Amino acid sequence: MDTSRWYRSFAEVEARGNSEVYEEWGNGVSEDPAVLALIDRLPEPRRQPNLIFGASRHLGAPVAPYALFRRWLSDNWSEVEQLAQTRTTQTNEAGRSAVLLPVLGLLKGPLSLIEVGASAGLCLYPDRYSFLYDGTKYLHPVDGPSTVLLECATTGSPPIPERVPDVVYRVGIDLNPLDVRDTDDMRWLESLVWPEQDHRRQRLREAAALARVDPPHLVRGDLTAAVADLVRRAPQNTTVVVYHSAVLNYLTLTTREEFAETVRALPCHWIANEGLGVLPEVDAKLTASPEARRGKFVVSLDGTPRGLAGGHGQFLDWLDQTRTAPAG
């Protein structure tokens, strides 16, 4: 992928409306041959805007206009390069649970949850968070309101359940699992939260504190290689759900196809929450206009799109109609 185009697209599609700082930085990098030359020294998967910007802020880059950031980046490139080679983009946004919950509510419990690309596992607790939909409908864990409240605006009347799901088993897979008890791992996750989004940073801290009470079981491994064994190990007489959010876009097309083929063959349900273009066979069933899809994630169940969502779980546009993908 052309790095200049990548950063321009990041600025115009992802950052615009969400982070003025990252929009300016993305546009600045896209037009800066010297900085692009530095970034192009990295393998393509390590050139991601979120990774470079997150690594920079982790190392102390100022949240400042592009000219100042550029100067800092040039002076500190060797440290940024080293960190980008060892860390990965593992944004663990608990807020995404709010757009997964209506889909989980369609499934009969009790549930066994298997999250691929789980990072620190903060999306493995949909039964322990409180939710607020459209400012009016609250949903709390069975033992009362949670210390973590996830808010989500909706359209299209999603089937918000009356109760949080009954989760009896939860496990995550990640190439590099992060530990909610490790200070540097948590600092890294905070560095991946965009500069102006203090509410997400606070939510991350609250979700991590909740998870530390009962740390998630996380397995280190390749998602395609590990998922079948975890499905087989799930308790009998439970509904097994494999799910992921903003994960497959970091894989090659071939690896995505291999994963999709693997999970479709397993005795489980499959919930995906991924950006447009990541799962073309799911996108092909969408009826929403290209403009309505722009910048949104597609939430699907067993290969059928159910909604369009904000990347951090801030909204869910429920879809009532889909069409079958054209033959051939």
Image: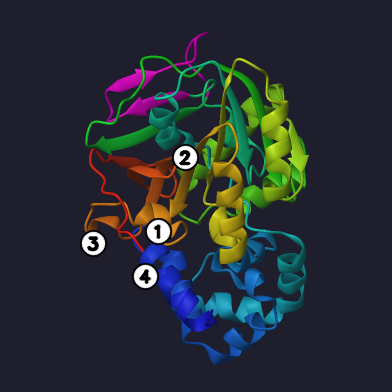
Q: In terms of sequence position, does the residue under pointer 1 or pointer 4 come before the other?
A: 4
Can residue 48 be found in the magenta stretch? no
Dot in front, 1 or 2 = 1
Badge 2 amino acid? Arg
Residue appearing at x 69%, y 76% in the figure: 43
Residue 119, labelled with which disc? none
Chain part drawn in magenta? 130-147
Q: Relative to 231, does residue 67 appear above or below in the rendering?
A: below
Residue 96, labelled with which disc? 2
- The alpha-carbon separation of the residues under discs 1 and 4 comes to 15 Å
Q: Which residue is mark 4?
A: 12
Q: In which quadrant of the rendered image does the C terminus lie? A: bottom left
- The alpha-carbon separation of the residues under discs 4 and 3 comes to 14 Å
Name the element at disc 3.
helix
Q: Dot 2: few (<14), some (14–19), or many (≥20) neighbours within 10 Å?
A: many
- The image shows residue 316 at horizontal and vertical percentages of 32, 40
Mark 1–mark 3 CB contact (< 8 Å): no
Residue appearing at x 60%, y 51% in the figure: 259
Name the element at disc 1.
loop
Q: Dot 3: few (<14), some (14–19), or many (≥20) neighbours within 10 Å?
A: few
Badge 3 amino acid? Glu
Residue 276, labelled with which disc? 1
Mark 4–mark 2 CB contact (< 8 Å): no
Name the element at disc 2.
helix
